[in-house]
């Protein structure tokens, strides 16, 4: 899982969201269990690539897989929505954060209200 997470993070930092999703898909098909850090990196890669719909799809997959989302995960998904002009979806995520008792930070709030 650490190796997959590192590869996804490296792809994210290199602006290669497509590669990050390919690695994530490969990981999901293997025996390795997807964890919060790995999902967060993949969501962040989509956010940086301007792919808000893919970011939200991954977020939904994360929830369906019963993997706990953290502040970083929510912030990446909210920022992806903000960059895509999807402010209503960003606010929905902020509400889910509060309902799930996940700590909101400056990045989360800033992205949701901009």
Image (tube, helix red, strand yellow):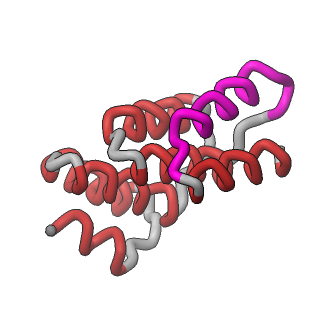
Q: Please, is residue 61 above or below residue 4 in the view?
A: above
What main secondary structure does the magenta stretch of the protein show? helix
User: Which image quarter holds the N terminus?
Assistant: top right
Q: How many marks?
A: 0
Q: The magenta stretch spans which residues?
A: 15-32
**Residue 49 locus on image (x, y percent):** 41, 46
Tell me the residue at 62%/42% (across/down).
67
Tell me the residue at 15%/49% (across/down).
85
**Residue 100 locus on image (x, y percent):** 43, 56
Q: Please, is residue 85 above or below residue 113 in the view?
A: above
User: Which image quarter holds the C terminus?
Assistant: bottom left
Tell me the residue at 51%/30% (across/down).
61
Tell whether position 19 is magenta: yes
Q: Please, is residue 110 above or below residue 112 in the view?
A: below
Which residue is most to the top? Answer: 29
| Foreground residue among 50 and 57 | 50
Which residue is most to the bottom? Answer: 106
| Foreground residue among 15 and 73 | 15
Q: Splitting the image into 4 quarters, where does residue 66 fall?
A: top right
Q: In the figure, is residue 31 to the left or right of 7?
A: right
Q: Splitting the image into 4 quarters, where does residue 16 fall?
A: top right
**Residue 64 locus on image (x, y percent):** 53, 29
Tell whether position 64 is magenta: no
**Residue 102 locus on image (x, y percent):** 46, 65
Q: In the figure, is residue 54 to the left or right of 4?
A: left
| Foreground residue among 75 and 9 | 9
């Amino acid at each position: 899982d650490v190796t997959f997470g590192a590869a996804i993070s490296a792809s994210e930092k290199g602006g290669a969201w497509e590669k990050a999703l390919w690695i994530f898909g490969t990981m999901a098909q293997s025996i390795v269990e997807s964890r919060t850090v790995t999902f967060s990196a993949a969501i962040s890669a989509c956010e940086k690539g301007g792919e808000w719909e893919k970011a939200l799809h991954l977020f939904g997959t994360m929830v369906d897989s019963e993997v706990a989302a953290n502040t970083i995960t929510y912030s990446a998904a909210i920022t992806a929505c903000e960059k895509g002009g999807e402010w209503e979806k960003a606010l929905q995520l902020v509400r889910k954060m509060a309902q799930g008792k996940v700590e909101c930070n400056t990045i989360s709030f800033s992205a949701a209200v901009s």
